Image (cartoon, rainbow, N blue to C red):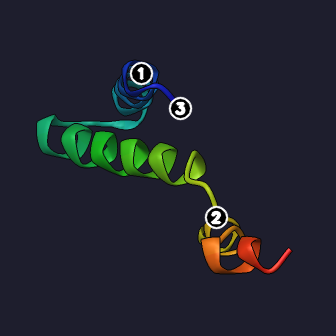
Amino acid sequence: MNSFFKTIIAGWGAKKLGGGCLSTIVIFVIIYMALGQCSRTPQRAALNTSPATENRR
């Protein structure tokens, strides 16, 4: 996910859910990190395409 859109979504969610200044910042960080985890690619996919296995074909 694009960093700009992650920031916008996290900011909107923090504004809706946060009560005070500190809780809004904490909620922003949590939402931003959660959105970053959603867009990660699995590590196993990178391991399946190693150059050593391609040379055997």
Relative placement, left or right, of 39 versus 12 is right
Q: Residue at x 64, y 80 (%)?
A: 52
Relative placement, left or right, of 51 versus 24 is right
From the image, tell me which residue sits under label 3.
1
For label 2, the SS is loop
For label 1, the SS is helix
From the image, tell me which residue sits under label 2.
42
Give x and y (percent) for residue 5.
45, 20
Q: Residue at x 59, y 49 (%)?
A: 38
Q: If you read the primary sequence from the N terminus, does the residue marked by circle 2 or circle 1 appear first?
A: 1
Q: Residue at x 61, y 55 (%)?
A: 41
Residue type pointed to by label 3: Met
Residue type pointed to by label 2: Pro
From the image, tell me which residue sits under label 1.
12
Relative placement, left or right, of 56 versus 12 is right
Q: Is residue 18 above or below residue 9?
A: below
Checking the image for residue 39, the label placed there is: none
Give x and y (percent) for residue 49.
69, 67
Q: If you read the primary sequence from the N terminus, does the residue marked by circle 3 or circle 1 appear first?
A: 3
Q: Is residue 49 above or below residue 39?
A: below
CA gap between label 2 and label 3 equals 15 Å
Give x and y (percent) for residue 33.
39, 50
Depth check, mark 2 against mark 1: the one in front is 2
Depth check, mark 2 against mark 3: the one in front is 2
